[in-house]
Amino acid sequence: MAPSLLHVFIALLTLTPAVLPTTPLPSSTSTATVACNNSPALCSRAYSNITHMGAHNSAFLRDASTGNSLAGNQFYNATVALSAGLRLLQAQVHLSNGTLRLCHTLCELLDAGTLETWLSKIKYWLDTHPNDVVTLLLVNADSQPAASFGAAFEASGISAYGFVPSGSGWPTLQEMIVAGTRLVTFIASIDTTATQYPYLLPEFSHVFETPFNVTSLSGFGCALDRPSSAGSATSAVRAGLLPLLNHFAYTAVTADILIPNVGNIDTTNSPSTSETGALGLHAQTCAAQWGVKPVFVLVDFYDRGPSIDTADRVNGIVATGRDTSGQRAASSTVALLVFMAVGLVVF
Ligand SMILES: *[C@@H]1O[C@H](CO)[C@@H](O)[C@H](O)[C@H]1NC(C)=O
Ligand SMILES: *[C@@H]1O[C@H](CO)[C@@H](O)[C@H](O)[C@H]1NC(C)=O
Ligand SMILES: *[C@@H]1O[C@H](CO)[C@@H](O)[C@H](O)[C@H]1NC(C)=O
Ligand SMILES: *[C@@H]1O[C@H](CO)[C@@H](O)[C@H](O)[C@H]1NC(C)=O
């Protein structure tokens, strides 16, 4: 699947002027001046050989737009996250009043709008960032048919970017960029017997996950949680499933009610490879156990840590072209105080 010279040439022609090199560079480095997902070093790397940092419940915000909802898992929205370097966005999709909406557990609890509107915003980001590959992970909470998801993807226009696997391994980022198929969409779970939307990929045909219900900073492990049919992490890796590291902690308010643990977030999202509960240590430990790097990582409050530092370290890159201007210095202390004052408990 190596891109032909013509394809590479076309890719260079279609770059935005802002990222074109202004002076000719030595031929050995000339193709390495354009960044893919914030680094020239990632262009020629297979999608499956890159750690894609992700925002867990990326549509569910703890900010002014939600009255600092305790159900919110992120301080910043999904496109701000993309500009800050994240390349994986996870969200729950529910059926409400006949429409697919992004809701946290229940639409009455936190309703982040329609799937179609959200996808339109991600599409706009892709339109304006032509050298970036983005992954979505959507939870099909109400077991809706592929056709309903397909309708939202098509109405938003984002389906044009949909990547369809060829069955012969994952391409490089550059190959996906040249082909214009820069959006990978996993859905848990979806019936794909209808073949009309081949870019809607059943998550567990491609991905395995570590547990997502961790309630203590010493609770992060590397064992396979889903799909149980894959057996162990070792057999899942051998079968070619891409590992997803769930790295967010909940505070158990009661046995049944969990809320995002924001109080310890600076530890949880830390790139430290020695501190208990730190993302850096979790990623390093699992990479050693699995023999492959985590391909996907999900965190809460992604800007803390900041979590992207761990992905950069695992990827061995120094990033370029990120924009963190949309981020204010969010205060977990304030959020925690709000929680304590309100005393509300939500998953
Ligand atoms: C993954 O990428 C690294 C860094 O470029 C490279 O050394 C390694 O050979 C790649 N692994 C695979 C399986 O392609
Ligand atoms: C995130 O916020 C920015 C600034 O308000 C807005 O332009 C953008 O559309 C938002 N993105 C999403 C996914 O809501
Ligand atoms: C349900 O959707 C209809 C149109 O599809 C709309 O008129 C109505 O206001 C919606 N109801 C609620 C409760 O959102
Ligand atoms: C997480 O889920 C697993 C499997 O459902 C369960 O055995 C375990 O007790 C749960 N752990 C916590 C902390 O809720």
Image (cartoon, grey):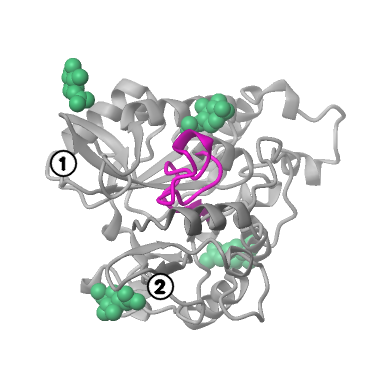
- Residue 345 belongs to magenta span: no
In the rendered image, residue 19, in percent from the top left (x then y), is placed at: 73, 29
In the rendered image, residue 116, in percent from the top left (x then y), is placed at: 33, 27
Real-space Cα distance between discs 2 and 1? 28 Å
Residue appearing at x 15%, y 29% in the figure: 98
Residue appearing at x 67%, y 44% in the figure: 38
User: What element does badge 2 sit on?
Assistant: loop
> Which quadrant of the view contains residue 135?
top left
Q: Describe residue 21's horizontal placement relative to residue 230 as left or right.
A: right
For residue 144, which numbered disc appears in the image? 1
Q: Amino acid at mark 1?
A: Gln
In the rendered image, residue 49, in percent from the top left (x then y), is placed at: 53, 60
304, 87: nearer the viewer: 304
Is residue 340 positioned above or below 35 on the image?
Answer: below
For residue 124, which numbered disc appears in the image? none
221, 146: nearer the viewer: 221
Is residue 126 visible in the rendered image? The answer is no
Q: How many labels were placed on the picture?
A: 2
> Which contiguous range is marked in magenta?
53-77
For residue 214, which numbered disc appears in the image? 2
Residue behind label 2 places its C-beta within 8 angstroms of ligand 4: yes
Residue appearing at x 41%, y 31% in the figure: 161
34, 342: nearer the viewer: 342
